[in-house]
Amino acid sequence: MHKAFIIKRVSVLLLFFAFQIGAKAQSNNILIFGRVVDGAKKPIPFATVYLNNTSFFSTTDSLGNYKIWVPTYLQKLELVAGFVGFKPGKVTLSQDGKSKKVLFRLESRTDLAEITVTAKRDRFWKRKWRIFEDGLLGDTPFASKCEILNPEVIKLDYDKTQSKVTAYSREPLLIINKALGYKLQVDVGFFESDGKLTYQATNKYFDSLEVNTVKDLKKIYKNRRRAYDNSFRNFLVSLVNGTTAENGFAIFQMKEIRNVYLGKVSLDDGSSNGFFHRAILRDLVQKDSLIDEYKLLTD
């Protein structure tokens, strides 16, 4: 059975996790190091510094110092520093094979100073939480295996006229995915959803959960492979390598712009009435040799 991706004439920001091998102090890694301080330049101990959307992270010591070994195959390095009560700091670095020193000076989160977390839940709480949870975790086969460990840190607002939920938090969300064997820390910068369309800006890193048996470990690896095979990342890699058909992907282009929700589109019906048509692979990907990057093109 083919996996179908529909290329729409709109730009879409997609966040995803890459499977990675833990880095050590070897010749194919570089060192990123520095300090995390507050507005008065005082060190912030126990702050977390990490590469966004990866498993590479560190915790500052009593003097605010940190260091992270990063593999050289990661070309774009988005470094994030965070601590409870402070706005996350973010720096984008280019990979040049050299060690880098980065200083973070975090600002206090005065914008959320008036927010207090209580156990009180209004009559809309269940609907608000369902929209938030579905929008954040998605609808993949393994989303139901995720558990949010500290839901009390999230503040939810609800616009009844538009059935729209916004969410924010002063602390990172802690999420475990037992099926994939990961524990995630997610900083929710912006979240808005009406239950159909979701817009979010999050920073996150993940770490492996402890596994008790070899049988459990094999099952986790099998699930990770399944998740990757059906991921947008695998699609992009296949697109660049020209192996979409071999990896089970079918690519269609829309005749006109419409909102399409996953699981609610019949490609057979769409193709027969001319709404969808097969995309030509060579027209979708272009390599920029000057910056050694690929561009995904749509008309």
Image: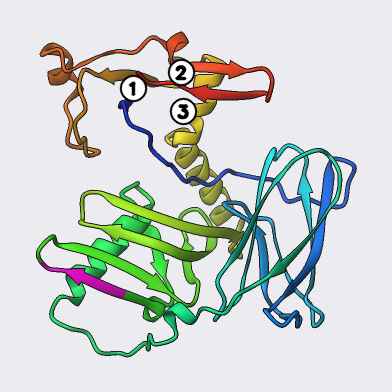
Position of 163 relative to 39 (above/below) = above
Q: On the rendered image, what quadrant is the C terminus found in?
A: top left
| 36 within the magenta span | no
Q: Position of residue 290 (x, y in %)?
A: 69, 20
Q: Is 85 situated left or right of 258 in this image?
A: right
Q: Is residue 231 above or below residue 131?
A: above
Q: Is residue 234 left or right of residue 73?
A: left
Give, as a single range, the part of the protein colored magenta: 156-160
Q: Which residue is mark 3?
A: 235
Asked whether the beta carbons under mark 3 and mark 2 sit within 8 Å of each other, the answer is: yes
State the residue at coordinates (56%, 46%). 221
Local crowd at mark 1 within 10 Å, few (<14), some, or many (≥20)?
few
Note whether residue 146 is visible. Answer: yes
Q: Quadrant of residue 65?
A: bottom right
Residue that badge 1 annotates: 2
Which residue is pictured at 43% across the width and 77% down the height? 150
Q: Is there any visible trace of residue 212 in the rendered image?
A: no
First in residue order: circle 1 vs circle 2: 1
Q: Amino acid at mark 3?
A: Phe
In whole angstroms, how far apart are the C-alphas of marks 1 and 3? 12 Å
Numbered disc 3: secondary structure: helix
Q: CA distance from mark 3 to mark 2?
A: 7 Å
What residue type is disc 2 on? Thr
Q: Name the residue beneath numbered marker 2.
A: 244
Which sits earlier in the primary sequence, circle 3 or circle 2? Answer: 3
